[in-house]
Image (cartoon, grey):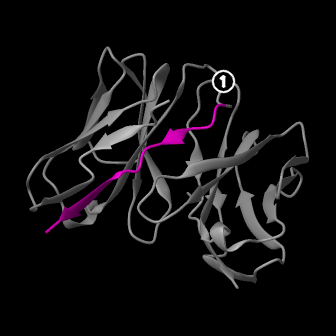
Amino acid sequence: DQQVKQNSPSLSVQEGRISILNCDYTNSMFDYFLWYKKYPAEGPTFLISISSIKDKNEDGRFTVFLNKSAKHLSLHIVPSQPGDSAVYFCAASRIQGAQKLVFGQGTRLTINP
Amino acid sequence: EAGVTQSPTHLIKTRGQHVTLRCSPISGHTSVYWYQQALGLGLQFLLWYDEGEERNRGNFPPRFSGRQFPNYSSELNVNALELEDSALYLCASSPRTSRGNSPLHFGNGTRLTVT
């Protein structure tokens, strides 16, 4: 049972344009969502998070949007830069109680010069 | 601040053997998590330790086990290795919290190859 899904295994975007990565979840109990970025031969690094009391969180070039009714979140990167080329994982958990993070399968983002 | 450290970085084992992977969390972090990333797949949750106790376990067979030591470091043991155990094993840590809203900090992983 894949509770967190990233349906696009890969995405290619021109440098300077907007990158939009999508993530869907099925468990309505999730109320905390995160995005991680992973380069080859490195562990994932935390990028940005959002709790279910918000529908948007911004941090520089990165914005995460949450649509609770659709159980959907997205990560917007603008403008996209070559260093953004990596695999992006979305993850979800419950804030109350000690809960593990559940990860999606990842989307490989390639930024073309 | 030193990050999460894992050892070894790479390992090659034969089917049926046993392996132990090690993880040192960030100083002050008491929770340690283990994830498996098989080729082409996402991160699959394996085990979670906090304050020396196993808090949660993923959908893996009992030959995957681990423990957490008093200094909060952890080890992951895999017995009777199978070819499909070949993967990147990632350890992560977080501060002690009863709320699941702390980002996990990951190490660079141990690449295990089973031949």
Return the residue at label 1.
B99
Is residue A59 rendered to the left or right of residue A103?
A: right
Q: Residue at x 32, y 42 (%)?
A: B6
Please determine whether, in this image, residue A36 is positioned above or below residue A79. Answer: above
Q: Residue at x 60, y 57 (%)?
A: A37
Magenta stretch bounds: B102-115
Q: How many C-alpha atoms fall within 10 Å of the one at disc 1: few (<14), some, or many (≥20)?
A: few
Q: Residue at x 55, y 19 (%)?
A: B96
Q: Is residue B104 magenta?
A: yes
Image location (x, y in percent) of residue B24: 35, 31
Please determine whether, in this image, residue A61 is positioned above or below residue B104. Answer: below
Residue type of the residue flagged with mark 1: Arg
Q: Is residue B23 magenta?
A: no
- Does dot 1 land on a helix, a strand or a loop? loop
Is residue B98 rendered to the left or right of residue B64?
A: right
Chain identity of mark 1:
B
Is residue B6 rendered to the left or right of residue A12?
A: left
